[in-house]
Image (spheres, rainbow, N blue to C red):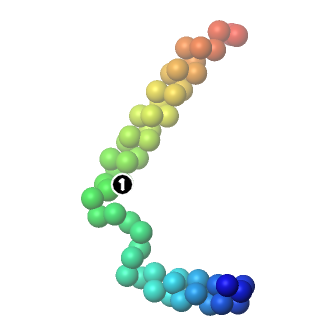
Amino acid sequence: MSFPSAAAQLVTLAAEGGANSGNHESLNPYFVGGCVLAALLVLLWITTRFNRDR
């Protein structure tokens, strides 16, 4: 496969991207954001518990 033919296929794929936007209908952005925030807070808590160089 040459570069121009690969580029042409990618352009065609990008033009058809309206049908599949990549978002899953069952994923709630607030739920995902809340889970990510909770995970980051847990990591922050773990980091501060192990940091005894204060």
Residue extending furthest front? Answer: 1
Which quadrant would residue 27 be assigned to in this image?
Answer: bottom left
Residue at the spot of label 1: 29
8 or 15, which lies in front?
A: 8
Measuring from the top left, give residue 44's x and y in whole percent: 54, 26
Instruction: Determine whether, in the image, residue 40 is placed left or right of residue 34.
Output: right
* On-image quarter of the C terminus: top right
> Residue drawn at (29%, 64%), measured in percent from left and top?
25
Q: Secondary structure at mark 1?
A: helix
Task: Examine the rendering and report whether any part of residue 7 can be seen.
Answer: no
- The answer to whether residue 36 is left or right of residue 28 is right
Q: Quadrant of residue 49?
A: top right
Horizontal and vertical percent position of residue 51: 63, 14
Q: Is residue 25 above or below residue 41?
A: below
Residue at the far left in the pictured view: 26
Q: Residue at x 65, y 9 (%)?
A: 52
In which quadrant of the rendered image does the N terminus lie? Answer: bottom right
Where is residue 50 shown, x and y percent of the image?
Answer: 59, 14
Q: Is residue 19 above or below residue 26?
A: below
- Judge whether residue 36 can be spotted in this image: yes
Total marks drawn? 1
Q: Amino acid at mark 1?
A: Pro
For the point 52% across and 28% down, the residue is: 43
Crowding at dot 1, Cα within 10 Å, few <14 / some 14-19 / many 20+, comes out as few
Q: Residue at x 34, y 50 (%)?
A: 30
